[in-house]
Every structure is written in structure tokens, then in C-alpha cells.
Amino acid sequence: MNENIIAQKSIGFAIRIVNLYKFLCAEHKEYVLSKQILRSGTAVGAMIKEAEHAQSKLDFLHKMSIGLKEANETNYWLLLLKEGGYLQANEYESIKKNCEEILRLLASIVKTTKTSVKMKT
């Protein structure tokens, strides 16, 4: 059975996001940005999981593209949290590294799938 690297990485990332949410609420009493990053950061893995049982290549592409958008949004919220003083530079760099790795993987999957879909039409 093939390992689904992107699914595994997205689950680990989602767990980090949930822990970040808990930290922001407990330590900083921050509830607005923390809710946004919780939503987008966990949606990445949810879309990847949905794509595993896509009805077609186009459906797969659509779900992975949404996952890519959610990862990009999460990257934005991370930057905002750092610039707003909620995350220290080392905390930010650590989780940003995970987010950017997922972004690169998803961008590659979307690009490859688009090429594959175009070849069939």
C-alpha cells in the first residue's frame, strides 16, 4: 500500500494548529485570529481526505485546489499572528516551515493533476 505523504503531513500540521489554537486562547486570550487559523489550518487535511475518494479526476483536482487555498490562507494567518506579537519568531518559523512544505506538495499535486486532466481532453 502506498504511503500518502501529504495526508500524513496534513494530519500532523492540523494537530499543531489545534495546539496553537489552545495556546492562543489560554495564554493570549485571543479568540478571533485563533478561530480563523483553526478553521483554515484543519480544513487543509479535511480537503485532502475528501480527495482520497473523489468521484473523478476533476473532483480530485477541485478538492486539492481548495486544500491549497486553505494552506495559503493559513500561511497568511500565521504571518498575522507573528506580526501581531502572538508568536515569537522561532515559533512562527517552525510552523511556517510545515505550512510551506504542505503548500509546495499541494501545488505540485494540483499542477500535475491539471496537466493530466488537460491531456485527456
Image (tube, helix red, strand yellow):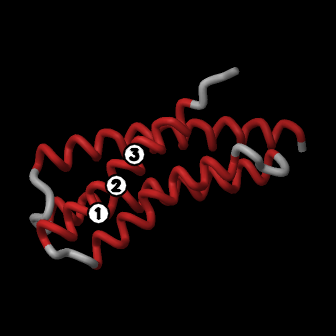
Above or below, comparing residue 3 to residue 27 in the picture = above
**Is 111 on the left or on the right of 71, as rendered?**
right
**Is 76 on the left or on the right of 14, as rendered?**
left
Q: Which residue is mark 1?
A: 21
Q: Which residue is mark 3?
A: 13
What's the distance in space between the residues labelled 3 and 1, CA to CA?
A: 12 Å
What's the distance in space between the residues labelled 3 and 2, CA to CA?
A: 6 Å
Mark 3–mark 2 contact, CB under 8 Å?
yes
Q: Position of residue 101 (x, y in %)?
A: 40, 37
Which residue is depicted at the point 45% across and 41% down? 102
Asked which quadrant contains residue 1, the reply is top right
Q: Position of residue 77 (x, y in %)?
A: 31, 64
Q: Secondary structure at mark 2?
A: helix
Mark 1–mark 2 contact, CB under 8 Å?
yes
Mark 3 or 1, nearer chain start: 3
Label 2: few (<14), some or many (≥20) within 10 Å? many
Above or below, comparing residue 59 to residue 105 in the picture = below
Quadrant of the rendering where the C terminus is positioned: top right
Which is nearer the eye, 85 or 14? 14
Mark 3–mark 1 contact, CB under 8 Å?
no
Which residue is depicted at the point 20% across and 43% down? 93
What's the distance in space between the residues labelled 1 and 2, CA to CA?
A: 6 Å
Q: Amino acid at mark 1?
A: Tyr
Q: Which mark is residue 17?
A: 2
